[in-house]
Amino acid sequence: MAVMPENARLTGCLDEIQVDFVERKATPRLLTKLGIQLHLAELSLLNTILILEVSGVERARSTVHNWVHNAELQPGSGRSPDHVAVDETDIWLDSDKYWLYAAVDPEMNDLLHKDLKHVTTGGLAWLFLRKLRGKHDI
């Protein structure tokens, strides 16, 4: 995997992005490269596909996500993410209600931390975030 400095993946021309991994030629190479660069520049997947649609190319979010992942331009692992998505939701297992806490690095699509509790309180949420911070130095 080619590890690039954080800002190097956003600069330069589109010719520097290699898309040889794309097997289907349904999307012009230039638009594939543009989609990768737009998303790496922190444009959301939704906004990236909307820009591609202006050029007449309709692609699913998962397709653009796969382009970015397969281009191997993501920052190296072991770093602290700049953004973390955190959610808590209630789930039912048999007749018991639980609260699932989860934190994800949205750039790498990696699950960073999870916890399952019988109840939810502000204190438990705080403890979850504290454990997350300790594990990933964020």
Image (spheres, rainbow, N blue to C red):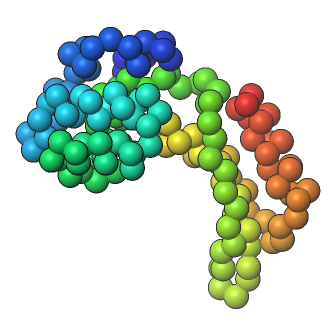
Snapshot quadrant of residue 137 = top right
Give how far across and how far down residue 61 sits, in percent.
34, 50
Which residue is more in the foreground, 118 or 85?
Answer: 85
Q: Is residue 136 visible?
A: yes
The residue shown at (65%, 85%) is 94
Q: Quadrant of the N terminus?
A: top left
Give how far across and how far down residue 100 sits, in percent.
69, 64
Q: Residue furthest front?
A: 54
Q: Residue furthest right?
A: 123
Which residue is more in the foreground, 77 or 41?
Answer: 41
Left or right relative to 8: residue 93: right
Q: Quadrant of the C terminus?
A: top right
Left or right relative to 68: residue 52: left
Q: Is residue 70 visible?
A: no
Left or right relative to 38: residue 52: left
The residue shown at (10%, 44%) is 26
Which residue is more in the foreground, 13 or 5?
Answer: 13
